[in-house]
Amino acid sequence: MANETTDNSRFPDGFRILHGKQEYVTYKEHSSIRIWPSSVPGHYDNHAHSAIEVLIVQRGTAVYQLPDQTYRVGPGQVLFVPSGCPHVLTETSDILRFLILFEPSPLYTLQDMPQVSMMTQHPIFLQNPGELREQVTHLLMSAVDCYMQKQDMWNTQCYAYLLQVYALLGREYLNTAAPRVPVRHSRIDPEIMNSVITYISEHYMDDLNLEDAAAFAGFSKYYFSRIFKDFSGISFSDYLLVKRLNAASNLLIRTNQPIREVARNSGFGSVATFNRIFREEKKCTPTQFRAIYGSTVTADINSPIFHSASGE
């Protein structure tokens, strides 16, 4: 892959891998979260990554330029930048901040997360003082402390704090920051839809489709398609795709399964389809993803991790 750069000069516990405007965040072994404190001003040209980015400013100002809006984040304020959102970050000379980057896929495994999934696709700016900002900041700083101490199960504990953050934000923003289409099917039993989510979790690796899920719920596929989107905020096909991609990502990182087995065990019909969809969504091939996020990535940051996908 051309134009690849590795920057190990700024962060003592991590580095950046850039390919054009796409950044591949590297994580410590057996983790999917990184936290960078800094009192050194920096400027980061336009880039995007799969991680959700959260900025907590304690002193100075950080200016984020997003496609549709510019945010000036000052002391006490918190900004959430969604996964895949291009942004430019510039910090003032007196900056003191914490930058949290984490993969959102663990959040999507929860049964009620589809109902707030749209919230994670929009910036959230906690600008004004109040109880919500205070509670969110406290939880985020608890995650920072947990990350810095690196006690047993620290990655899980950090996500526990992040889940509490999204529970707070979900109650506040579900009907404001990312309003859903009004539910027209008021008689839908939530237990039925939760059973469908469980059914998908148990069968996403099979040849599952809309007709199968509709039959399980006891509805026609057209009716089921409408009510699933009303319930979850996204279409059935999009939800199933996210589920399969998350499963594939975990297999690539946590196991040594060949690419063909990863494709089969995460529900993709063929390795060619898997490679194409994975590249479209993750901006890299499965092999490249494994090299970047797998446990061997820290062994040699100068190794040629990007290579042809012809063997996949």
Image (cartoon, rainbow, N blue to C red):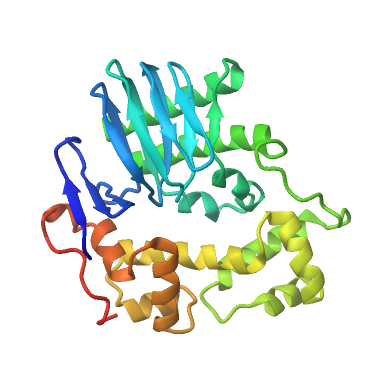
Answer yes or no: is residue 37 visible: yes
Quadrant location of the N terminus in the rendered image: bottom left
In the image, residue 162 sits, relative to residue 18, either above or below, namely: above
**In the rendered image, which quarter contains the C terminus?**
bottom left
- The vertical placement of 75 against 101, above or below, is above
99 relative to 28 in the view: left or right: right
Residue 198 in percent (x, y) is at 63, 63
Identity of the residue drawn at 81% across and 49% down: 182
**Residue 131: % across, % down:** 60, 18
Left or right: where 35 falls relative to 104: left
Q: Nearer the viewer, residue 87 or 245?
A: 87
Q: Residue at x 40, y 47 (%)?
A: 51
* Residue 294: x %, y % from top left: 26, 59
Viewer can see residue 218? no
Tell me the residue at 47%/39% (across/down). 66
Residue 70, placed above or below residue 3 = above
In the rendered image, residue 40, in percent from the top left (x then y), is placed at 23, 23
Name the residue: 56% across, 37% down. 166
Observer-nearest of 65 and 30: 65
Identify the image quadrant of residue 38.
Answer: top left
Q: How many marks?
A: 0
Using the image, determine if residue 204 lies above or below residue 49.
below
